[in-house]
Image (cartoon, rainbow, N blue to C red):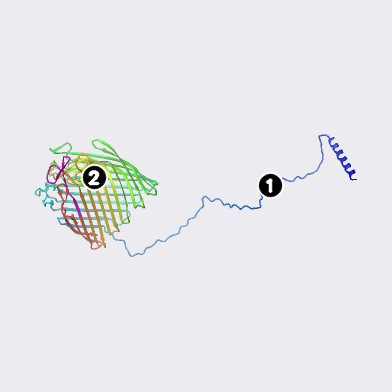
Amino acid sequence: MKNSMKKLLLLIVLFNGCFLFAQNDVIEVIGKGSRDVEPASRILEFPKIIDSIKPTNVPSYPMLVFRQPTKIELDTIEAATVETTEKLKPLYPFYAKIGVGSTIMPLGELYYNSTRSRNYFYGMSAKHLSSFGDVKNREKVTYAPAQFDRSDFNVFGKINESNYNLSGDLHYKNNGFHYYGIPVDTISADSISQRFHQVGGNFEFIANRGDTSTLNLSFGMGYNYLTTKKPIVDSLSEWKTQEHSFKFNTKGWYKYRSETFYTNLGVRFNGYKYGIRDSVLTAIDSGLVNNNTIIDLSPGVITQMFDDKLKAEVGVTLSIDIRDKTKAFIFPKAEFKYSLFNDIFIPFLGIRGELKQTSFRSLSDENQFMLVNTQLANENTPFDLYGGFKGTISKKLSFNLNASFAKVMNKALFVTDTLHSIGNKFGVIYDTLNLTKLEGSLSYQMNEKLKIDGIARYYSYETKNQAFAWNLPSFQFTFRGAYNLYDKFLINLDANLEGGRKALVYETGKGVFKENNQYYQNLGFIADINLGLEYRYNKRVSAFLQVNSLASQRYYRWYNYPVQPIQVMGGITARF
């Protein structure tokens, strides 16, 4: 039965297959009806790996706001109050000092200063000192009249504002003295007398526009007029020294970050005149006129590096010397300092140069016994190389050691004049020299109770034409000390020691030596020691005692010019 059914099904399949292969290629189907099609849908999920281990969630942070509005509320703060019974120390505008010395030396000083003020400071001073005593040398020989008097008047003022500073002063000086360098006391005082008059003033303006990234300016000028005593004969009134000196300087500086850029521009004029130009008074005395102008331009930069430990200044100076002929000079300017161990040890090294204007005023300030008719030549220092180190050993003790080597051209040296005088005046000669200097100083200060300073210097001169650097010392030692005992007794001590000075002479004699066909004499050792004592009766009145030339040494400051021995001066001071 089963086999019959299989055969029947096989026949039906074969029949239908034949029927299909017998149909045409095109089949048309016509019919009607409705068919619903489901809308398409998008899979929103991305492919991912399904793992049995769930990953840790990664936190997300929102972006920070670039500008967040803020609100500031100011609270009022009450002013601080300090309760104390102490008061500010009163300031007295006037200070007077009156005294007299053992050699009939009257002394008078008067000072006036403004009291406390933030913006204004002004005052004046008047000082006078004279002497009517005689001078003797070491052999007790009395010299020519040696009386002198010195008077000085000064008025000054200053304005301090936030954006500028203004200051100025006016001065007048009157110095009368005698050329007493002659061991004869029978000479008339009028025949060897001399008097210098000086009048002038200074002015300075500083524009403080800011500390950094701005240009600051300063301007300064000064004038001084000097004249000597008129001749006795009125017809010879022009035969005296007259000198006009004027200076002007402006400076601009600009600070940017750690650098400060600056430029100085200055003009110096000196007009010296003795007598009448191209005129002859005697065979050895003729008129002199010397007009000199110097223009200086000095740019530079100051910088600090390595946390302000290294400070460097580099620049250059151009000086134009206008005289009968115009000359230009260029001078180096550089200095380097480095702070070690928090300013305990500061080594430094530098080089500099300058053109120093020589005037009758500058020469007479050094030696007033010089001739009033003299030739002037500017001192030129092409280079001055220096270095050393300074620092502090403790809060109370500091030191400074340095050495320098310089070349100096037209160095003024004073020598005894025998052509225009009887040997009691000094002429000026100029020479070129190499100067080596060693210097050391030590300072100690214990609050306001004790102050001590000591400076030692050694000089070595190598001259070009002269045998020695006349009247210049080979070594110097300066000592200054001040002690305050209970603010009741004040003690001051200062000493100046010098040695190695030599004077040019023109003939042989006792104590005269010869070097390079030139005669010279040693001027001896200087020991100038002065002691001052002051007793304060109260805060306004005190008494003082001053002992000068404590060593009582009649040393020679200049050849044939001994100084007075020990001098004692006493007086009182008052504040009101």
Expressed as whole percent of the image width and height from the top left, the position of residue 201 reads: 25, 47
Q: Earlier in the sequence, mark 2 or mark 1?
A: 1
Q: Answer whether residue 227 is visible to the viewer in this image.
A: yes
Which quadrant of the figure contains the C terminus? Answer: bottom left
Expressed as whole percent of the image width and height from the top left, the position of residue 362 reads: 22, 45
| Residue 69 highlighted magenta (yes or no) | no
| Residue 508 highlighted magenta (yes or no) | yes
Looking at the image, the residue that sits furthest to the left is 186
For residue 68, above or below residue 300: below
Crowding at mark 2 (Cα within 10 Å: few <14, some 14-19, many 20+): some
In the foreground, 392 or 166: 392
Which of the labelled discs sits on residue 520, or is there none?
Answer: none
Left or right position of 330 against 178: right
Name the mark nearer the viewer: 2 or 1: 2
Q: Are marks 2 and 1 in contact (CB under 8 Å)?
A: no
Q: Name the image quarter holding residue 359.
A: top left
Q: Name the image quarter holding residue 426.
A: top left
Question: On the image, numbered disc 1 is attached to which residue?
Answer: 43
Left or right position of 493 against 31: left
Expressed as whole percent of the image width and height from the top left, the position of residue 436 reads: 25, 44
For residue 307, above or below residue 540: above
Magenta region: 504-529
Does dot 1 land on a helix, a strand or a loop? loop
Left or right position of 569 against 332: left
**Amino acid at the residue labelled 1:** Ile
Which of the labelled discs sits on residue 460, or is there none?
Answer: 2
Expressed as whole percent of the image width and height from the top left, the position of residue 561 reads: 15, 48
